[in-house]
Amino acid sequence: MSDYRVHCPPGRGLPSEIILSPEESHHLVVVNRALQGATVVAFDGEGHEWDTELVKPDKRAARLFVRSTRTALPLPFDISLAQSLPKGALMDTIVEKATELGVRRIFPLLSERSQVQLDADRRDRKSERWRVTALEAAKQCGNPWLPTIAPIESLPEFLHRQPEFHVALVASLHPGARSLKSVLAEFRNCHGSMPRSAIWLIGPEGDFSPGELSAATAAGFKAVTLGPLVLRCETAATVAVGILAHELQQTV
């Protein structure tokens, strides 16, 4: 197995060689100290991978000779994460763990209790940082699929134009929240199979307000408990995605 993984833009078809971007070249040659002749796996984040040989270790435009090409099978589950923005750098951790767990789409949201104030410039910088975080996580864990990270929007905007999923779940500390197993069993009983796509909605520090939770359930989200303890939002996101991925994977 190669010790090096690099990212290249999608849409390359069947190339005989790959020229890396200055950023990827610098990371491969300067940071990772890859030498000429090293085996490198290049991936485009859309399931395509190339086994290559580093033939020109240029720190600005490293050149890779393609030995073979393969297309990864899609992951056996399609999970999205809608995360209300926490304060500080916690969203970086959430994006990292979501990528490692195979999340397909990430929707960053602003809610009533989000302790974040962002102008347009800061939103762009945040989005770019999360993209880099996801890329580094995909390299580290060998995930050939990069999650799509949507623009930051408010929770009401998201609920108004909510994409279609077979099942929509909101993590809740409020009374009446059900277990994930019971929600999935209900879906299976109604449809004869487990859901092929799902989304988790996770609140910020302090959770969603009662009004926001009511709006989410009115939009079709089912309130689900993650257990009797109060979890930090980054823990809740990781646990929620992990247990759902486990449940959906068992049906394949």
Image (cartoon, rainbow, N blue to C red):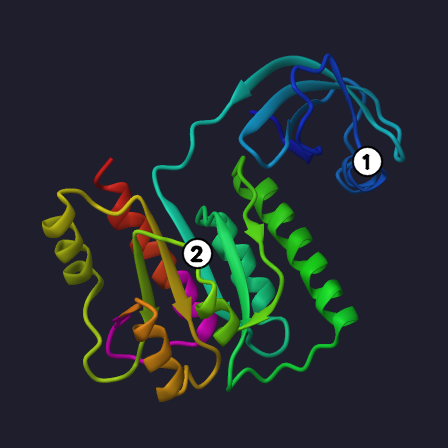
39 is higher (above) or lower (below) than 112:
above
Q: CA distance from mark 1 to mark 2?
A: 33 Å
Q: Is residue 19 left or right of residue 147?
A: right
Quadrant where the image shows the N terminus? top right
Answer few, some or many: residues within 10 Å of disc 1's Cα (few below 14, many 20 plus, some between 14 and 19): some
In the figure, 142 relative to 101: above or below?
above
Q: Which residue is mark 1?
A: 21
Residue 235 in which image quadrant: bottom left
Q: Position of residue 75 (x, y in %)?
A: 40, 37
Q: Quadrant of residue 127?
A: bottom right
In this view, which residue lies farthest toward the left? 189
Residue 185: image x %, image y %? 13, 55
Residue in the foreground of this view, choosing between 178 and 1 = 178
Name the foreground residue: 126 vs 100: 126
* Residue position marked by numbered label 2 in the rendering: 163
Q: Which contiguous range is marked in magenta?
A: 223-238
The amino acid marked with disc number 1 is Ser
Query: Is residue 228 rendered magenta in the image?
Result: yes
Name the amino acid type tagged 2.
Pro
Q: Position of residue 133 (x, y in %)?
A: 64, 54
